[in-house]
Image (cartoon, coloured by chain):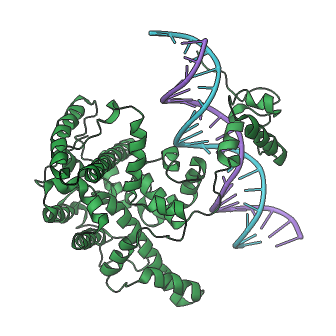
Chain colours: A green, B purple, C cyan
Amino acid sequence: MGRSPCCDKVGLKKGPWTPEEDQMLLAYIEEHGHGSWRALPSKAGLQRCGKSCRLRWTNYLRPDIKRGKFSLQEEQTIIQLHALLGNRWSAIATHLQKRTDNEIKNYWNTHLKKRLTKMGIDPVTHKPKNDALLTTQAGSNYSSSKSAANLSHMAQWESARLEAEARLVRQSKLRSHPLLATSAAAAQLATRSTSIKSWSASSSINVHVDLESPTSTLSTTTAALPGNPISSSDRHEDDRSPSIPHMFEFIKDVSHHQHDDASDDWTVCQLAADHHSAINDHHHNHIAVASGGTISCCSSMEAGGWTLNNKESSNGDDDVAEEGFISLLLCDSTAAAAGGDHQEHGSSSEVNNNSEISGGGGNEKNSNKDSSENNSGSTMTTTNEHEHEYCEDKNYWNSILNLVDTSSPSPDGDDTHMF
DNA sequence: AAGCTCGGCAACCGCAATATG
DNA sequence: TCATATTGCGGTTGCCGAGCT
């Protein structure tokens, strides 16, 4: 057994590519396509292994690659997707147009990871550090916490995926048959409820583990609060990490705002929960769960019964569904990023919501940006930058929370997890 | 000006998954 | 079905330039 290493041939060049080599590779691929990567180097006259050529092409020479600074929108998207997917860079890259997995990975490792750490958030679990610490201690070793994080990521992915499927199905129903949409969806729910349980039962994954919240970030239970060193009272001025109580405030206010608005966003986000036909209950559940213990999106799915038949439906449609899912999941933020960087901070409604609940924040996001541009070097700038960053943090959390908000909690508080 | 440190990024390495005969 | 080849992916390394002493 065993494979012959692809790069151990004598005489093959390694290290940085020269412009000449780039040109040769580019010219060959433009004319012939890459075909077999292994055969390519000799055909193109390159003293490189095929693997090296492939990497050079995919990470650097490909014409559809966007290089340069990541926009805030892209950053947000990466963080959101990382919270859902973990270190699946290629999967993340597919939803950031023109960015390579390598570039995203590097950017994560050199910028975003550090930033989250600085904010007091564990970049692996996307939990506040203290909580991660507790988890680790409870789990008694690193591997258990890591596997829990992985499991959490899987659960997050699947839960969000299921919710998105719900939205897609419902949207298509609404389009094709508006009047029958509700009853048809309800009927489908009943059917799917059966299948999801059967999948759950047949699956070897017994997820009775408390997966906590869909985004981990929210999984902090109130049990952690009494001794929480970052309570709002003793929070250091410079500690811009969103404290847990603050995070819960975001949930409440954002939820109510959306409810009052009956906006399209809300409609979309609410789709998966609407068969519970109790929007108010939905909100109350959110609040109650947030203040009373762990949040579970999984329970809602079991109640709702949406399913994609998961791995069993391994046909090409999955990819399509996944694409649509991500678009919905990110609430168009990815699309906005792809369309241009002018809309830098997620949906405007989110920002406005934040402003409303920030207690004096007002339109601090934009005003801060302006002032920091106009008052560079001043004390005011520093303060505004802090507020700005804090606001960004809130946006980050709200983006995460938004994902959670699309998952409807079980009306009966059932904490049985589906996975 | 020279040496040192550190951060960013391109590229490499090795494993896993998939394709092919 | 199995063995091998190929491709994809994620972790890691090492080079290079900027900033600091």
Percent from the top left, x then y, of residue A86?
Answer: 44, 48
How many labels, in total? Answer: 0
On the image, the x and y values in percent for residue A254 come to 28, 71
Q: Position of residue A88 (x, y in %)?
A: 48, 45
Q: Residue furthest left?
A: A412
* Residue A266 as seen in the image, left or right of residue A179: right
State the image quarter where residue A391 is shown: bottom left
**In front: A29, or B9?**
A29
Q: Determine if residue A287 is in view.
A: yes
A11 and A301: which is toward the camera: A301
What is the x, y in percent for residue C7?
60, 32
At x 69% / y 34%, what residue is drawn? A34
- Image quadrant containing the N terminus of chain A: top right
Horizontally, residue A37 falls left or right of residue A79, namely right
Q: Is residue C11 left or right of A56 when viewed as pictured?
A: left
- Residue in view at x 31 percent, y 46 percent: A165
Give above or below for A76 relative to A58.
Answer: below
Q: Can residue A304 be seen here? A: no
Quarter assignment of residue A17: top right
Seen from the viewer's position, the closer of residues A55 and A260 is A260
Quadrant in which the C terminus of chain A appears: top left
Say which residue appears at 65% left-offset and 58% top-offset. Answer: A67
In the displayed structure, would residue A226 be above or below residue A175?
A: below
